[in-house]
C-alpha cells in the first residue's frame, strides 16, 4: 500500500507534528511519500520512519501549469491513498480523482492567516465541491465539525473527528531542564515567565499578546515573555524588543526544532489568537504542567470549559481579562494547581496513542488489509 501526503507546507508547525506522528506510527510495509507544495521540508527533522520519500516539487507560476504538474506528480506516485491537508492542498483532491486514486482523505486543521476572522467566499465555493470528492474529511475540532456540517452541508457520516494528540510521556515537567534553560536565558528564580510558541502570523494576534504582557510588566516587573517562533510578522516582535518598557522583559529565541526545553522553563502559557482549532502548542504546554491563559476561540472553550486548567476570555474583553488572569496567577499555589489539572486533562483526552488509534480506525474504514491493520495496531504508539 502507498500513501501520498500532499501538504501546503512541511514546515515546523502543529499540523506537521500531527502528520509526522501518524507517519511514524504506520508500519514500514506501507510506503509513504510527502509532497510539499511550497518546497518547505523542515519537519523532516521529526520523521523517524525509514520508508518515507520526499517528492521534489517546484511550484510553477500560473494555475494551469501548477494543476498540470501536480496531476503528473500524483500519477507518477501511483498511490492507493492520497491524504491532503488544509486549504492549500485541496487541489490534490480533485486532481487525485482525475488521476484515479481509489481513496482520498482530506484533513482540515484550520484556516490560513488571511481567513483569520472569516472564511473567503470564493474558497467556500471550492470547499463545497472538493469536500464532497473526498472519501472522508478529518477534522481536529468540534468547531470545524459544526462548521462543515452547517456551512458546507457535509453529512456527518463523511466527517471524522480526530482531536490532536501528543506524546505525554515525553512532554513532562522537568525541573533540571527548567533550571538549565532559565539560567542560560538569564531568568531569575523569582521571574514569572509567560510563554508563547507559534508562527508569527496575523491570526496569532501578536499585538494583543504584547499589549497584555506590557500591562503585566507595568504592574509587576517580575513578568518576562519568552517567545519561540518566526514568520511574516517578525517586525512586531522586534519592535517590542526595542520598546523601553519591555526591554529586558521580552526574550525571543527564534524558531526551534525542539520546543520542549523552553516549555519546561515557562510558568504560564499565553495564547491570544483570533482563530484556532485545537492548538498543539497549547496542548504541549498543558502536558508539561503549565496553566493556560487564552482567547476563547475554536475548541479552546471545549478544552478549558471547566476552568481548572486555565483561564480564557472572549476576544472583545480579552485585554482586560487576560491581564487580570495573569496577575492572578502570580500565586504559585494556583499555578501549580492549574498546571497539574492541565496535564491530567491532556493525558486523559489528548494523548498521541488515542489520536493514532482514531487514524487507525479511518484506515480500517477505507479498506486497509487485515495484515496492514495488524501491523498498524502493533506499531501505534
Image (cartoon, rainbow, N blue to C red):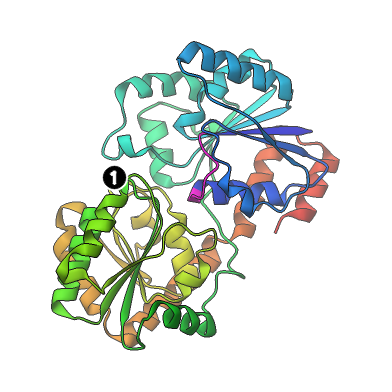
Residue 288 lies in the magenta-colored region: no
| Label 1, residues with CA under 10 Å away: few <14, some 14-19, many ≥20 | some
* Quarter of the rendering containing residue 244: bottom left
Q: How would you classify the magenta stretch by its main secondary structure?
A: loop
* On-image quarter of the C terminus: bottom right
Magenta segment boundaries in residue numbering? 8-14
Q: Residue at x 69, y 29 (%)?
A: 81
The residue pinned by badge 1 equals: 202
Q: Nearer the viewer, residue 323 or 124?
A: 323
In this image, 354 relative to 184: left or right? right
Does the image show residue 205?
no
In this image, 379 relative to 20: left or right? right
Residue 366: x and y in percent read: 69, 32
Q: Residue furthest front?
A: 242
Residue 127: x and y in percent read: 43, 24
* Quarter of the rendering containing residue 226: bottom left
Question: How many numbered marks are there?
Answer: 1
Question: Above or below — where is 222 with respect to 36?
Answer: below
Does the image show residue 220?
yes
Amino acid at each position: 500500500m502507498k500513501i501520498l501526503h500532499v501538504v501546503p507546507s512541511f514546515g515546523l508547525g502543529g499540523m506537521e507534528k500531527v502528520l509526522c506522528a501518524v507517519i511514524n506510527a504506520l508500519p514500514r510495509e506501507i510506503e509513504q511519500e510527502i509532497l510539499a507544495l511550497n518546497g518547505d521540508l523542515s519537519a523532516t527533522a521529526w520523521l523517524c520512519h525509514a520508508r518515507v520519500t520526499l517528492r521534489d516539487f517546484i511550484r510553477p507560476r500560473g494555475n494551469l501549469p501548477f494543476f498540470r504538474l501536480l496531476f503528473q506528480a500524483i500519477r507518477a506516485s501511483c498511490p492507493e491513498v492520497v491524504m491532503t491537508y488544509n486549504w492549500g492542498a485541496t487541489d490534490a483532491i480533485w486532481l487525485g480523482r482525475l488521476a484515479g486514486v481509489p481513496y482520498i482523505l482530506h484533513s482540515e486543521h484550520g484556516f490560513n492567516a488571511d481567513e483569520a476572522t472569516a472564511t473567503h467566499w470564493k474558497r467556500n465555493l471550492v470547499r463545497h465541491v472538493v469536500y464532497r470528492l473526498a472519501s472522508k474529511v478529518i477534522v481536529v475540532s468540534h468547531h470545524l465539525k459544526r462548521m462543515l456540517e452547517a456551512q458546507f452541508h457535509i453529512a456527518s457520516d463523511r466527517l471524522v473527528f480526530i482531536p490532536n494528540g501528543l506524546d505525554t510521556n515525553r512532554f513532562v515537567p522537568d525541573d533540571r531542564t527548567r533550571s538549565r534553560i532559565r539560567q542560560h536565558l538569564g531568568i531569575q528564580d523569582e521571574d514569572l515567565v509567560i510563554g508563547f510558541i507559534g508562527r508569527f502570523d496575523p491570526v496569532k494576534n501578536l499585538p494583543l499578546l504584547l499589549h497584555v504582557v506590557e500591562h503585566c510588566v507595568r504592574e509587576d516587573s517580575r513578568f518576562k515573555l519568552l517567545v519561540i517562533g518566526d514568520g511574516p510578522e517578525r517586525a512586531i516582535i522586534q519592535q517590542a524588543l526595542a520598546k523601553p518598557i519591555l526591554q529586558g522583559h521580552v526574550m525571543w529565541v527564534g524558531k526551534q526544532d525542539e520546543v520542549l526545553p523552553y516549555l519546561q522553563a515557562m510558568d504560564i502559557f499565553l495564547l491570544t489568537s483570533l482563530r484556532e482549532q485545537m492548538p498543539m502548542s497549547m496542548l504541549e504546554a498543558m502536558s508539561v504542567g503549565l496553566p493556560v491563559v487564552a482567547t476563547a476561540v475554536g475548541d479552546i472553550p471545549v478544552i478549558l470549559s471547566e476552568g481548572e486548567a486555565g483561564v480564557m476570555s472572549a476576544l472583545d474583553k480579552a485585554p482586560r481579562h487576560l491581564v487580570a488572569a495573569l496577575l492572578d496567577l502570580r500565586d504559585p499555589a494556583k499555578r501549580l494547581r492549574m498546571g497539574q489539572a492541565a496535564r491530567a486533562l491532556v493525558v486523559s483526552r489528548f494523548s498521541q496513542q488515542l489520536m493514532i488509534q482514531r487514524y487507525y480506525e479511518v484506515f480500517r474504514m477505507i479498506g486497509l488489509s487485515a495484515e496492514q491493520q495488524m501491523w498498524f495496531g502493533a506499531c501505534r504508539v
